[in-house]
Image: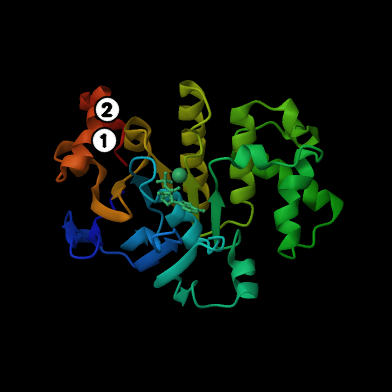
Amino acid sequence: MFYYAQVRGAEGNAEGVGLASRVRTPVLEVSDLRVSFPTPRGPFLAVDGISLDLYAGERLGLIGESGSGKSTVALALMRLIKPPGRIESGRVVLDGADLLSISEAEMRTRRLADIALVTQGAMNSLNPVMRIRHQVLDGLQAHGARLDKGEAEARVEELLRQVNLRPEVANLYPHQLSGGMKQRVCIAIAISLRPRVIIADEPTSALDVVVQRRVIQTLRKVQDDIGASVILIGHDMGLMAQFAQRIAVMRQGLIIEVGDVRDVFASPQHAYTRQLMESVPSLRRPSVLGAARG
Ligand SMILES: Nc1ncnc2c1ncn2[C@@H]1O[C@H](COP(=O)(O)OP(=O)(O)O)[C@@H](O)[C@H]1O
Ligand SMILES: [Mg+2]
């Protein structure tokens, strides 16, 4: 499937990507988002006015060097920026409602149910003294799911299966799992309420290369299963090429380039994008770009 559509780049950088042969309504519309952190010399804009649309069922890669503002964007979309950090301006419209202007109570009901985040350190934030079963059920129950024992069991089993884990994993504690398994559990939790949007912030950065690929494959499978739109944040261009249909490149709080993954890799418009890609020589191999199809 192809998701060509009009894309808004960073302010003053609007770009049309591909042909609007199949224009879709965006699920998530981010406009002019600005996030600041105070410094002795005044507010520092870690996100300096970004605009971006995410379409139904789309897999978007957000890349950029460390410190470019990727995680700050992820947290802002979830409205999880901690003070003294602050969202200065912008709109984050999910299914017609601006997440930045609803009440905190309403936002709480929307997190996980409509928009879910797998953070970089997610696998280390699992509760060490709680069995996986209860951690998977936690989110469901916090959102008011009333499940009897049998239903709960079946739901946990189904979620674990969706991320390629055996049902027995439900009985285990985090320390009994490998890093890759823990990250899969975090993905299971993120999809437990079938959100429309999943943001995965460098979900594989602590894992070895083979496991990274498998976890990304799992993310792709669940994305397909539940028909969610995914923003995958990372700096590994090889993994991005395998996962994403569209790529947005961040630098110093701005999106400087956005486009179809093959277009960006074949002819990056920005010198910075070229630099990011030169660090992955294998990208020039056709097999990698072949994997980006579909
Ligand atoms: N809580 C914070 N307090 C102060 N500065 C922050 C905070 N979080 C992020 N920053 C700053 O914002 C910029 C972007 O950070 P971040 O979004 O984590 O980048 P990335 O995820 O792309 O590596 C960095 O310069 C970082 O130092
Ligand atoms: Mg980060």
Residue 281 drawn at (x, y percent): 24, 23
Residue 288 image-quadrant placement: top left
Q: Would residue 121 be seen by someone viewing this image from the given angle?
A: yes
207 lies above or below 47? above
Give the structural element (helix, strand or loop) at label 1: helix
Residue 175 image-quadrant placement: top right
Residue at 60% from the left image edge and 50% from the top image edge: 190
Q: What amino acid type should be assigned to the residue bearing mark 2?
A: Ser
Looking at this view, name the residue that lies furthest to the right.
Answer: 149
Q: CA distance from mark 2 to mark 1?
A: 6 Å
- Name the one closer to the observer, 147 or 81: 81
Residue for badge 1: 276
Residue 285 drawn at (x, y percent): 22, 23
- Name the one closer to the observer, 43 or 1: 43
Residue 201 drawn at (x, y percent): 48, 45
Label of residue 279 in the image = 2
User: What sort of colour scheme is used for the picture?
Assistant: rainbow
Looking at this view, name the residue that lies furthest to the front.
Answer: 40
Residue at 82% from the left image edge and 38% from the top image edge: 129
- Name the one closer to the observer, 48 or 135: 48
Q: What amino acid type should be assigned to the residue bearing mark 1?
A: Leu
How packed is label 2: few (under 14 Cα within 10 Å), some, or many (20 or more)?
Answer: few
Residue at 48% from the left image edge and 29% from the top image edge: 212
Confirm or deny contact between disc 2 and disc 1 (CB under 8 A).
Answer: yes
236 lies above or below 46? above
